[in-house]
Image: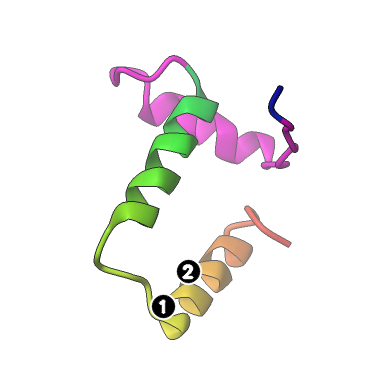
Amino acid sequence: MSDYTTISLRKEFVADVEEYIEDEPFGSVKEFVKHVVVQEMESDEGVSEAEAKQIAQKLRDLGYME
């Protein structure tokens, strides 16, 4: 049996993702997010610490993160 955890996302963000994946082969936001995360983890191109901080700040500015 696998253990799971919950990740909270703003409803507006989830709505944006649902709209984005409307014509894509993903059955849910969960499947899409998992796909993106796994793809990023397997990528040889990493995100620098500075880039990660910039992305996080942009997400906070947009209200997707606190």
Amino acid type, callout 1? Glu
Residue 21 point in image, percent of width and height: 37, 25
Residue at image x 68%, y 41%?
10
Residue 62 point in image, percent of width and height: 58, 58
Quarter of the N terminus within the rendering: top right
Question: Label 1's element?
Answer: helix
| Magenta span dominant secondary structure | loop
Q: Which residues are magenta?
A: 3-27
Is 57 situated above or below 42? below
Q: Is residue 28 left or right of residue 62?
A: left
Quarter of the C terminus within the rendering: bottom right
Between 4 and 26, the residue placed more toward the observer is 4
Q: How far is disc 1 from disc 2 in space, using C-alphas?
A: 6 Å
Which residue is identified by label 2? 55
Residue 36 point in image, percent of width and height: 39, 43
Which residue is identified by label 1? 51
